[in-house]
Image (spheres, rainbow, N blue to C red):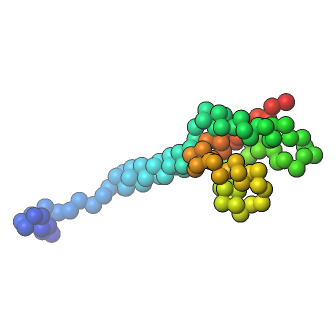
Amino acid sequence: MPVATGGQVSTQRRRRPTRDRVFATTAAGFAIIVSGLTTGYGADAEVGRYLSTECMTCHGAAKTDSTIPNIFGLGEAHFVEVIKAYRAKTLPNPVMQTIASRLNDDDIGALAFYFQTAKKPK
């Protein structure tokens, strides 16, 4: 079938994508999406460790019978959701609202990554 290119008609046929090419394109797209998920949460544990010093004041000393929740080992997505809710003031706690209001999305992501992997000090 003739194909028009730049005002000229070519007699070449359009190539159909091969199964391998479709697979490679799909795999590359999936890899980009997955890498975006981890970097979307700012997977920088060193920044998270640095920022966590303020969190440790209360959460590091919290006992099991305390009203202060254990945030060590908390999943990244849940941590991000909760801190953003404090930042938006949809969760009631003036202390956490103040702390969360100073954090940007990258800071929250770094903290989430850090606390997901950190162990509570003894």
Quadrant location, the C terminus: top right
> Can residue 38 be seen?
no
Relative to 45, is 39 on the left or the right? left
State the residue at coordinates (12%, 64%): 5
Closer to the camera in the image, 104 or 69: 104
Residue 75, image x and y in percent? 70, 48
State the residue at coordinates (76%, 50%): 95
Residue at the extreme right of the image, as rendered: 65
Relative to 60, is 34 on the left or the right? left
Residue 116, image x and y in percent? 70, 42
Q: How many marks?
A: 0
Residue 62, image x and y in percent? 86, 41
Residue 111 position by quadrant: top right
Residue 115 position by quadrant: top right
Residue at the extreme top of the image, as rendered: 122
Residue 40, image x and y in percent? 54, 49
